[in-house]
Image (cartoon, grey):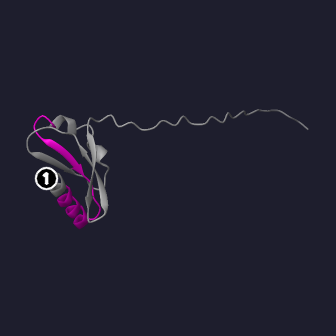
Amino acid sequence: MDVRFGAVLAIAMVAPVVTQWRDPSPHQVQSVTVDGATRLEVLDWGGSGRPVLFVGCYLTAHVYDNIAPKLTDQFHVYPSTGYDPQRRADDILGVITALGM
């Protein structure tokens, strides 16, 4: 047998380091029940003045983590997420009502 090239490949199996995600954004978390039994998580960045309600287009509320704190000097900031347009509208109305906005 003619061996011109030989290679040894060593593969080290390393378990990935699992870190729990930490939310660095300065907000309070609360739950609001809409539609009888559906609980929505509402993020409240606080602030003063008229409320600002962020409505996401099928996105997580955390897409606003960078911008929301910048608005709290003039507004009380809340995000909202939803599903189809009617369900989203109903959920938004439910959150507004529950929070007394």
Position of residue 82 relative to residue 14, above or below, is: below
Residue at the right extreme of this rendering: 1
Query: Badge 1 local density, few (<14 within 10 Å), some, or many (20+)?
Result: few
Residue 88 falls left or right of residue 76: right
Residue situated in front as seen by the camera: 45 or 37: 37
Q: Is residue 15 magenta?
A: no
* Quadrant holding the N terminus: top right
For badge 1, the amino acid type reads: Gly
Residue at the left extreme of this rendering: 49
**Residue 51, percent across and down?**
12, 46
Residue situated in front as seen by the camera: 42 or 19: 42
**Residue 34, percent across and down?**
25, 61
Based on the displayed image, in which of its 4 quarters is residue 4 positioned? top right
Query: Residue at position x 20%, y 60% from top?
Result: 94
Q: Does the magenta stretch include residue 92?
A: yes
Query: Residue at position x 20%, y 46% from top?
Result: 78
Position of residue 90 relative to residue 12, above or below, is: below
**Residue 17, percent across and down?**
54, 34
Query: Residue at position x 12%, y 41% from top?
Result: 75
**Residue 72, percent across and down?**
15, 37
Query: Residue at position x 52%, y 37% from top?
Result: 18
Q: What stretch is highlighted in magenta?
A: 72-95
Number of numbered discs: 1
Residue 79 falls left or right of residue 5: left
Disc 1, SS: loop
Which residue in the structure is indicated by mark 1?
A: 100
Based on the displayed image, in which of its 4 quarters is residue 62 positioned? top left
